[in-house]
Amino acid sequence: MLHIPPSLKHKKFFYLWLGQLISITGTQMQLWALFWHVNQLDENPIALGGIGVARIFPVIIFSLIGGALADSVDRRKVMFATQSIAALLALTLALLTQFGNVTIWHIYFITALQAVVVAFDGPSRQALIPNLLPKKDLPNAFSMTFTAFQAGAVLGPALSGILISSFGQEAVYYFNAISFVAVLFALFMIGDVPQSIAEKAAGISVDSIKDGFRFIFSKPVIFSTMMLDFVATFFASANTLMPIIATDVLNVGVVEYGYLSAASAVGAVTVALVISQVKELRKQGTLFLGSVIVFGITTLIFGLTRSVVVAWLALAVTGAADGVSTIIRNTIRQLQTPDHIRGRMTSINQIFFQGGPQLGEIEAGVVAQLFGASFAVITGGLGCILGTLWIVWKWPQLRSYNGDEPMLAGATAD
């Protein structure tokens, strides 16, 4: 019998979770609409790789500052600012598109600005969650956060294709701009949230950022999960090439493109809901590594098939595998990191989990330009599998991680 996940019984977390669910739907709609939009403006695969370029450099440059900021000031206030700016950027893109003035360079520039916002928003948002509920409910909270993200990723691409075909590209961008209001309202309802301000980081400084790196390098279990996250998403990042796979390989249109884009999230939501009903996950290291191997295998199948049904199913399984991986690695990192340094840990991790897919989009675009989209996806799947095996060899302690190891003390809600 299904039960209400324990994390949603905490009012402050529930407000944030619901706001994110709405906002993520708009963000995912815009993401997949951007891929389609760029492909309509320039059919060369390398043009899609430009989105990755626009997103990666702001993340690398500003994430570390965003992490130090999250440990030094009120994380809720940071989110108020970032969510407001993100809404204005989406509105700007909608207006440029509606009045016929948008170019591919406008898209790249606005995408880069949105990446700057993410670099500041991500550390504060993820570090805020452990302050909203007791430590014992934190694994469930990350499971539900992932569920919200993937539910938005199911609805977003599907709605994106329908809106584009019915009302035009700009309709997606307008919807995304409005969706940020949900998070702003949630932050207002949450009210003040106590947090542990970093003892050594009263402000943003090089020393405070170095403390974050020193902490991560001293924790092999945390560092190895970041490395695996980067390797898997770098090689098996097929999202950027989806418009080309849909139109040139599977021979379908924008609506079917939306359904294919949502397939991964359908699998992820399914597995996240299953995990939300499980009280305790054991043998987490084995589950984590196995899920990444499955992710690589099903990416390989997606690259090989010419059937829309098989492609959809393969993408759904990649999403399920990624869901298991994401929930476990986020739980490991947050439980093994004290609150006063959690923002900096999250910001460094953001470079890995944002950098992997964005650099992967560039790599996929270049390989697709030279050898074709299917070849890029197939070699990416193989690279994911080989990279995972290397990490298992390099950090064998990850495989033996069970999930009941001692948790570091952190400042969480009562």
Image (tube, rainbow, N blue to C red):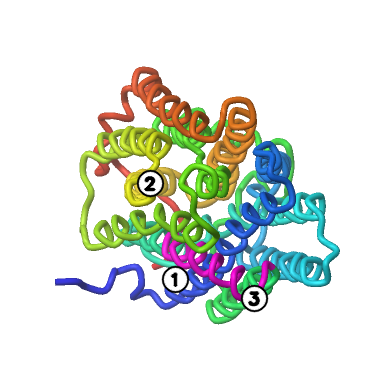
Crowding around mark 2 (Cα neighbors within 10 Å: few <14, some 14 to 19, many 20+) is many
Tell me: 294 left or right of 187: left
Give the number of the mark in front: 1 or 2. 2
Image position, residue 79 (x, y; %): 64, 65
Q: In the current view of this chain or complex, which residue is farthest to the left? A: 1
Crowding around mark 1 (Cα neighbors within 10 Å: few <14, some 14 to 19, many 20+) is many
| Callout 2–callout 3 Cβ contact below 8 Å | no
Task: Give the structural element (helix, strand or loop) at label 1.
Answer: helix
Residue 397 seen in the current view: yes
Q: Earlier in the sequence, mark 2 or mark 3?
A: 3
Give the number of the mark in front: 1 or 3. 3
Quadrant of the rendered structure where residue 295 is?
top left
Q: Which residue is mark 1?
A: 13
Tell me: 280 left or right of 100: left
Task: Give the structural element (helix, strand or loop) at label 2.
Answer: helix
Q: Earlier in the sequence, mark 1 or mark 2?
A: 1
| Callout 1–callout 3 Cβ contact below 8 Å | no
Q: Earlier in the sequence, mark 1 or mark 3?
A: 1
Crowding around mark 3 (Cα neighbors within 10 Å: few <14, some 14 to 19, many 20+) is few
Q: Which residue is mark 2?
A: 311
Quadrant of the rendered structure where residue 362 is?
top right
> Compared to 60, does 11 lie above or below?
below
If the image is split into quadrants, where does the C terminus sit?
A: bottom left
Q: Which residues are magenta?
A: 150-169
Image position, residue 138 (x, y; %): 36, 58
Residue 64 seen in the current view: no
Q: Residue at x 29, y 62 (%)?
A: 273
Of the numbered discs in the image, which one, if any, rests on residue 167? 3
Image position, residue 112 (x, y; %): 74, 50
Amino acid of disc 2: Ala
Q: In the current view of this chain or complex, which residue is farthest to the right? A: 101
Q: In the current view of this chain or complex, which residue is farthest to the front? A: 251
